[in-house]
Image (cartoon, grey):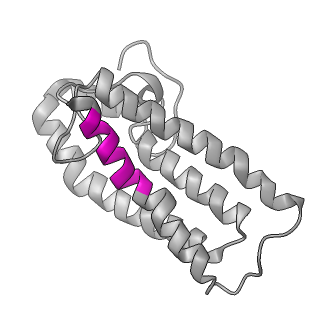
């Protein structure tokens, strides 16, 4: 059942931000950029692949190590400090932004770049106003130590034990 919930929330949340919204923005082509041309646009493909891989890795870690999902209504039961979480506290958000930047390059879309900016502001507010206070209450000192050794948005080299 946990696996099905993880898949459902992965399709709903990151799927909405990295697939549905970009599709709607690109299909409208209201951002004034002509259809994609030239080899430069293909530089977006590695970013999309890296971001998608990061998302899947984090979702798997939430499922397998944290025993929960990425949704705030069904969060992990254990603090996840493995995998990409050893380097940055919010790798799912970073991975989603990486996907969208890749899509913006691939489709030459200013609207998608605007989506990244809006997404970052919303994610930052959600993380600082909701997620971090909840994690501090739930995991206490272990989360506090984790925040002191792992950056919120920018990766750091992992310490021996967060």
- Which residue occupies the extreme right position in the image? 38
User: Going by the image, does 12 lie left or right of 133?
Assistant: right
Residue furthest top as drawn: 160
Left/right of residue 30 with respect to residue 125 in the rendered view: right
Please indicate, yes or no, whether residue 12 appears anywhere in the rendered image. Answer: yes
Q: Is residue 50 above or below residue 39?
A: above
* Residue at (46% x, 36% y) in the render: 56
In the image, what residue occupies the spot 25% across and 46% down? Answer: 71
Q: Is residue 34 above or below residue 11?
A: below
For the N terminus, give its image quadrant.
Answer: top left
| Front residue of 149 and 26 | 26
88 to the left or right of 104: left
Residue 14 included in the magenta stretch of the image: yes
Q: Is residue 81 above or below residue 5?
A: above
Magenta-colored span: 4-15
Residue 138 image offset from top left, x and y in percent: 12, 34
**41 to 136, vertically: above or below:** below
Question: Residue 155: horizontal and vertical position, in percent?
Answer: 52, 36
- The residue lying toward the viewer, choosing from 11 and 117, is 11
Q: Quadrant of residue 12?
A: bottom left
Q: Which quadrant is the C terminus positioned in?
A: top left
At 46% from the left and 64% from the top, the residue drawn is 20
Report the residue at 17% width, 28% height from top.
77
Residue 95 in the image: state x and y as whole percent. 51, 45
**Predominant SS of the magenta segment:** helix
Task: Locate residue 9, reporting x and y percent.
Answer: 30, 47
In magenta stretch: residue 62? no
């Amino acid at each position: 059942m946990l696996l099905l919930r993880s898949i459902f929330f992965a399709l709903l949340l990151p799927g909405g931000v990295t697939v549905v919204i970009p599709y709607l923005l690109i299909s409208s082509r209201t951002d004034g950029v002509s259809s994609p041309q030239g080899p430069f646009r293909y530089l977006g493909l590695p970013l999309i692949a890296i971001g998608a891989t990061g998302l899947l890795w984090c979702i798997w870690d939430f499922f397998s190590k944290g025993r929960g999902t990425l949704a705030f209504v069904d969060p992990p039961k254990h603090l996840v400090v493995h995998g990409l979480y050893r380097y940055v506290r919010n790798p799912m958000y970073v991975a989603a932004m990486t996907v969208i930047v890749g899509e913006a390059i691939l489709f030459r879309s200013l609207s998608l770049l605007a989506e990244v900016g809006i997404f970052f502001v919303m994610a930052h507010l959600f993380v600082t106003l909701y997620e971090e206070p909840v994690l501090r209450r739930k995991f206490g000192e272990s989360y506090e130590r984790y925040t002191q050794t792992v950056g919120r948005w920018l990766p750091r080299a992992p310490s021996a034990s967060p």
